[in-house]
Amino acid sequence: MNEAVWLAAGATTVGTLLIRMLPLFWMQRRRRRRAVTTGPETAMPIWPRVLAPLMIAALLGLSLVPHDVSAAGWGATMMGSIVTLLVWCKMRTLGLPVAAGIAVYALVFLIGS
Amino acid sequence: MNIPAWKMGAREALPLLSGYLPVALSFGLVASQAGFSAFEATVLSLLIYAGASQFLFVGMIAGGAPLWLTVAMTLLINARHIVYSASLAPWLSNSRRWPWLMHGLTDQVFALAHYRLPLLDEKDRLGWYSSAALVAWGSWAGGTLLGSLAGERLIMQWPLLVEAMAFALPALFLVLLAPRCTSLRWFTALMASTLSALLLGLYDLANIAIPLAAALGALCFYLLPRTINRKHS
């Protein structure tokens, strides 16, 4: 990497950090102002509350595309997802459903390919 | 349950470690094939720390694209992160550490934090988030280093392991979203967002899939009558 590429990497780093950091400052300032004038319940706008879960849903959709787009890949993804949800319904925890999903995914993928 | 918050954060970030490693291995491999040294690739992962845009950064540099365009395109892909810290703001104190910790706010860390932070006491949030973000950051950088040094060999030797580990991310997102399906209105909007992102991903439009699919889901949410919400919640 020459000096110019390092500079580009630095600019990308700073830009990405600002994208992640500045909305926090903005929202905290807004909350402080609104909490004084109209009360804490109106301090937070509605759009982040709606958009945030929908962005996580989009991340889910994107991550569901199997690396190996084949019948084995899709079958493993489907079975892994079903088992993850079933275990979650039973346990209501984070770790175990994910581990069970991975195990079933690997098993179905191995059998199918 | 009296586990220290930092320990809980590290433990809950383990699925991220499993999901990040295969992608980080691939990034390390792609970066080394594009002429970046293991040190350079790892530094990129530590500093920029944003999956898709790092692939784009390395690809555009290797392809000889103008540097200003490379930076602009990379930041454009990361623009979706604008929503993340704003959404978490109600659960973050005024500590001066929080803004700097936003460096670790990737898509996956955001999804995890959005689920967990509201359930924690205020005093535990900083510790929980710091350790969860650190595990994710470390696994991304470590995976990149490993991928740069031995990525090809690892992927050839254990293809099933690499494939299966990547499923940790969709499994985690499923678990994080399941409690959000509190009404038919929310369920429909979440499904619309998930399925449209899946379709866009299949057509190689991953870079715009997240904002576009979320916007479509939001459209569904606002178009559906509020009465659906009341009946089922």
Image (cartoon, coloured by chain):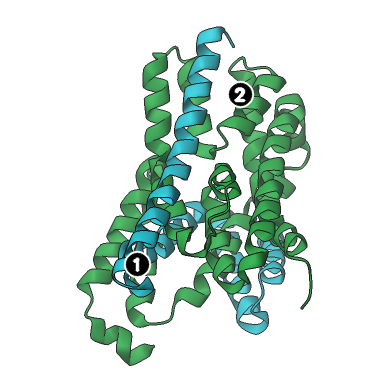
Chain colours: A cyan, B green
Circle 1: element type = helix
Q: Residue A45 falls in which quadrant of the image?
A: bottom left
Q: Is residue B196 left or right of residue B108?
A: left
**Which disc, if any, is residue B31?**
2
Whether residue B1 is situated above or below residue B19 in the rendered picture:
below
Whether residue B43 is situated above or below residue A109 in the rendered picture:
above
Whether residue B16 is situated above or below residue B230 in the rendered picture:
above
Rendered location of residue B179, percent (x, y): 51, 76
Location of mark 1 (residue): A36
Q: Is residue A59 left or right of residue B164?
A: left
Image point 24% across, 64% down: which residue? B219
Query: Foreground: A26 or B45?
Result: A26
Image point 58% across, 53% down: which residue? B95
Q: Are marks 2 and 1 on the same chain?
A: no
Whether residue A92 is situated above or below residue B113 in the rendered picture:
below
Rendered location of residue B13, percent (x, y): 68, 57
Q: Is residue B91 visible?
A: yes
